[in-house]
Image (spheres, rainbow, N blue to C red):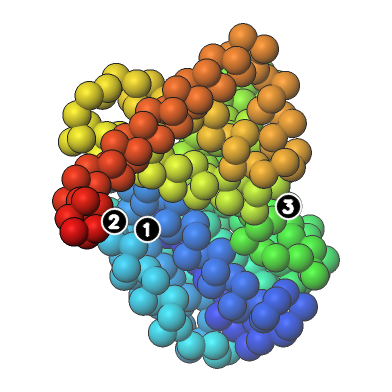
Amino acid sequence: MEATVVLVDNSEMTRNGDYAPTRFQAQADAVNLLAGAKTQHHPENTVGVLTMAGKTPQVLVTPTPDLGKVLNAMQDMKIEGDVNLATSVQIAQLALKHRQNKNQRQRIVIFVGSPIAEDKEALVKIAKKLKKNNVAVDVVSFGSEEANSDRLEAFHAAVNSNDNSHLVTVPPGTILSDMLFGTPIFMEEGAGGGGGGGEEGGAPAPRSNVVDGFDYGELGVDPTLDPELALALRVSMEEERARQATATAAAAQQGGGEATPAAGAAAVEAATPVAAAGGGEAEGMAIDAMDDDMLLQQALALSMQVEQEEMQEGGAAETPEPQQPPKDEEAK
């Protein structure tokens, strides 16, 4: 379980268009996706939103499991003023301190899209305080990454404990949400157990294919390498499963041969990654993972299902024929 407060950069600098369509809108899309991922990873996870610019940093949404409140807050957010990072982080820590469920781990995610005014020493001091209070911090640096590089790296080094915090730098000209999709910031957190897996990337391995509560390993594609393909395959798989469930239910109602459609549905579900890939790289990966016997079994199951469906359709078509007028009566 985790309580997260997302710090959003709503300064005037975020009007720049070096991230399509603008820094602010690209950031808003990433925040919306992150909030959705966090709330779906665990039913008791909560997400809050805090603005860093304007007259003073402002908590728009206290940590809540209601994703709708986060989306509404991002839609109504105004662009104004300059970023005040130090004050924003301290307010976020206070919001986490007063979270309702004290069993939740504490996390702050900071989006920085403009130059920060605080010096390195001030940021390190704040980072040490966060570390002392067991607050993990993820930082997304974009737009002004060169100007902020030294200070954010020092901040990250001071707050990081057992690799529970991360610093991600996104270059201009890219899609912010896509670049963050495969990073530890979006991944399902095993951070609490990350200390036990401290040997050479032992922690990232088990969660490398799990994003947004869905295991992409069964699709035969790595979401960190091609997030768009992974999402497309996921949608295809879910649609195929729904179609097969409907077909199985219809066959069961018609009677006779319930087992065969179920077996065919199971086989098609297992073969979905290959069918959904549509001849791309994912198809090759999935086929390589299967031996010849498995492919033959799936082909046999599919052929049996198609044959039974044709027989059922043929029987249904023959039923109304006796209702037609006899030819002898027409002749008389």
Observer-nearest of 94 and 138: 138
Q: Which numbered circle lies on residue 153?
A: 3
Q: Residues within 10 Å of mark 1 (few under 14, many from 20)?
A: many
User: Residue 57 placed where, x, y %?
Assistant: 46, 77
The reply to whether residue 103 is in sight is: no
Which residue matches tag 2? Answer: 65
Q: How many marks?
A: 3
Residues 102 and 186: in front is 186
- Compare marks 1 and 2 and give the one earlier in the sequence: 1
Residue found farthest to the front: 332
Question: Which circle marks residue 47 in the picture?
Answer: 1
Look at 50% across and 60% down and name the residue there. Answer: 33
- Using the rendered view, name the quadrant where residue 317 is placed: top left
Q: Quadrant of the N terminus?
A: top left
Measuring 28% from the left and 41% from the top, which residue is drawn there?
318
State whether residue 328 is above or below residue 306: below
Q: Residues within 10 Å of mark 2 (few under 14, many from 20)?
A: many
